[in-house]
Amino acid sequence: MCGIVGYVGGRVATPLLINGLKRLEYRGYDSAGVAVWQPEALVIRKCVGRLSVLEQSLLAQPIAGTLGIGHTRWATHGEPNEVNSHPHTDCHGRIAVVHNGIIENYQELRAELQQQGHTFRSQTDTEVIPHLIEAELAAGAPSPEEAIRRALRRAKGAYALGILFHDQPGTMYAARCGSPLIVGVGPGEHFIASDVPAIVDQVRRVIYLNDGEVVVLRADSVAISRLDGTPVEAMIQAVTIAAEAVERAGFETFMLKEIHEQPRILRHLLARHEWQNGTVAMPDLALGAPYFRKLNRVMVVACGSAYHAGMYGKLLMEHLTSLAVETDLASEFRYRDPKIDPGTLVVAVSQSGETADTLASIRMAKTWGCKVLSICNVPGSTVARESDAVFFTEAGPEIGVAATKSFTAQLMAFALLSVFIGRARNEVGEAQAQELLVALRTVPDAIHYMLDRSADIRKLADKHHDGPSSLYLGRRFNYPTALEGALKNKEISYQHAEGYAAGEMKHGPIALINEYLPVICICTQTRDEVYAKMVSNMKEVEARHGRIIALATDGDVGMPQLTEDIIWVPPGRDEFSPLVNVVALQLLAYYAAQARGTDIDKPRNLAKSVTVE
Ligand code: F6R
C-alpha cells in the first residue's frame, strides 16, 4: 500500500525523502512523487514506475529545500499515471497532500466541491482532501490545522496524510485515521513515515500517532491535537529495531535473508518462553492462566499467510486443549453474523499489525465484549495497541513482500500458546508439556538442515518451474502448510498454484492431474494416521502420471518408489513438522521465482501492508 515520508528540519529534504521511500518499497507501489517547499511555490515532481526513476529525475534536476513530503502510490482509485500520483494539490497549488488509505465518501465530496467551483485533475479519492482544506480556509478556518481538522471531520474512510501549505514555511502537517503514521523525532528535525523502517537510519525516537490525531511539526516543535481541537500530549518512544535490520546483509534479496533468519528467530522465541514454574513462560502476556482456565472458545481471525498460521493454530489448540477453536478470514468474519459472546477469546494474527480487515475484526470483537489477543510482529502497530494482550513474534522487520520469517514465528507463537493454555487448563500434563518443548527446541536445527539442502531444492525448482500451474497437497497439520506453500509460489513466481487438503483431491482437483502438473505432496507426518492416507493420495497422483515432488522424512524407504523428486526433511514431532516443511516450500518457491526471473522482494501488484479493505 502507499508509503509516506515527510521531513522538516535543517537538511535538504529530497535525499531523505527518497531514502525513506526506498525503505518503504516493500509495501508495494506503482508510482512516486514529492512536494518540496520553495519560496516561490510548492515544487512537485512525480514519476510512474520505480522509485529509481524519480530519484534519477531529482539527481538530474535537484529541488533544494528543507521541508518536503514524499509518497509511493499503490493505485486504488484511478490507474497508475503521473496525474493520479501524489502529491495532489488544491486549485492553486498552494496546498500539497500525500495520502495512504481510501476516502470512502470522496464522490459526494468531489461533487459538492466541483459545484463550488473547484477544479479536479485526477481520478483519485485523495484529491478531495486539498480541495476540502482549501474550502475550509476560504470559509474562515482560523488556521491551517483547524482547516485540516474541519476537512477531516467530513472525510469518511481511512487516511494517513502529510500536508504542506505554501504560506506556512518551515511547517509540516500530518494526520492519521485508520492508516499507519509515525513521527520521527531528531535534534532540530522531524520526520513523518508510514513505518519505522523508513526512518530507522535517521532517528532513534518516534511518536506513534493515534487515529483522529492531527500533528503540526516544525524543526523544533511537535503539537498534536484531536479532530475536535483538544491538545494531546506527545508520547515519545525509543526505536527498538536496529538500522541494520532493514539491510540485506549480503543476501541477494530480503526474502532470502529472511528465510535464513528463521532458526535464529525461533531460537530467540524459545528462549523468551523458557520452561518456568511447570509451564512455558509468557513474560509479556497480559492474559494469565486464570483467564485461560475460564475460557470457552477461541476465534482466530487473520488474512493471507497469517490466516494459514491461524489454521495451524486451530489444529494445535484443539489437539492440546479442550477448547473449541475456529479460524476465519478477517475479510469474511467481519461481514458474517458469528455467534460470539464475551466468553470467546478472539486471536488476531498479523505481521504488520495494520491489516484493515484484521483491525476491523478486532474492533467488532471488542464491541461484543470479547478479549482480543494478537500475535503480531510490529510493536506500536495498531493491532498491537488495540489488543488486550499481545504475543510479539519478535522476528524483526520483514521487508520481502512475501511473508516467511513472520509466518514461522506465528506458528511458533501458536505452539507455545497451545502448550501454555493446555497447562493452564490442566489438559496437558507437566511431563507432556516438557516433551513438547523438547521437540520444539529441535525445530531451529531442523530448519538449518533444510537451509543446507537449498541446492537440492533449487534443482527441483529448476526442473519444475516452467509449467503454468502446480498443486500442493497436505493433510491435518500440513494442510495449512500446503496452502502456504502454494501462496508463496503464486506470489513470487507468478505460477498458478493451488493448495488443497489431500483428502479433497478426489472431489475435483484430480481432474487437473496429467504428466505436466507438478504435485507437491507433504508426507512427513510419519507417526500420524494421515500418513498412510497421504501415501494413497500420492499413488493416485502417480497413477495419473502427475509429477510428484514429495516432502518426506529422512529414512522413509518407501518414498523413492513413488518419486525421484524428494525433499528430505529431518524427523521431528508431527505437530511441529509444518515449521520445518514450510521452509522447504519457501525455498522451492524462491528458486522457482528466480528461474522465472521475477522481482522477488517486490512482486507485482502486491503490497506488504494491506491497510485498505
Ligand atoms: C503473504 C503475505 C500476505 C499477508 C497478509 C496479512 O506472503 O504476506 O498474505 O500474510 O496480507 O498481512 P499481516 O500479517 O500484516 O496482517
Image (cartoon, rainbow, N blue to C red):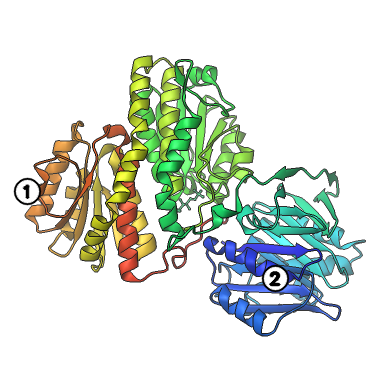
Quarter of image, res 123? bottom right
Q: Residues within 10 Å of mark 2 (few under 14, many from 20)?
A: many
Place of residue 33 in the rendered image (x, y in percent of width and height, measured from the top left)? 65, 74
Eye-nearest disc, 2 or 1:
1
Q: Secondary structure at mark 2?
A: loop
Quarter of image, res 244? bottom right
**Residue at left offset 29%, top offset 45%:** 449
Place of residue 26 in the rendered image (x, y in percent of width and height, measured from the top left)? 52, 61
Q: Looking at the rendered structure, which numbered label has been put on residue 240?
A: none
Q: Nearer the viewer, residue 123 or 38?
A: 38
Q: Residue furthest bottom?
A: 60
Q: Secondary structure at mark 1?
A: helix
Task: Give the position of the C terminus as an image quadrant.
Answer: bottom right
Label 1 CB sits under 8 Å from any ligand 1 atom: no
Q: Nearer the viewer, residue 529 or 297?
A: 529
Label 1 sits on residue = 561
**Residue at left offset 65%, top offset 85%:** 60
Q: What kind of residue is marked 1?
A: Gln
Tally the marks: 2
Q: Residues within 10 Å of mark 1 (few under 14, many from 20)?
A: few
Q: Is residue 482 visible?
A: no
Q: Is residue 590 visible?
A: yes
Label 2 sits on residue = 127
Q: Nearer the viewer, residue 180 or 104?
A: 180
Query: From mark 2 to mark 1, how far is it between C-alphas?
Result: 63 Å
Task: Give the position of the N terminus as an image quadrant.
Answer: bottom right
Q: Nearer the viewer, residue 308 or 241?
A: 241
Q: What kind of residue is marked 2?
A: Glu
**Residue at left offset 43%, top offset 60%:** 251
Place of residue 57 in the rendered image (x, y in percent of width and height, measured from the top left)? 63, 82
Place of residue 4 in the rendered image (x, y in percent of width and height, measured from the top left)? 66, 63
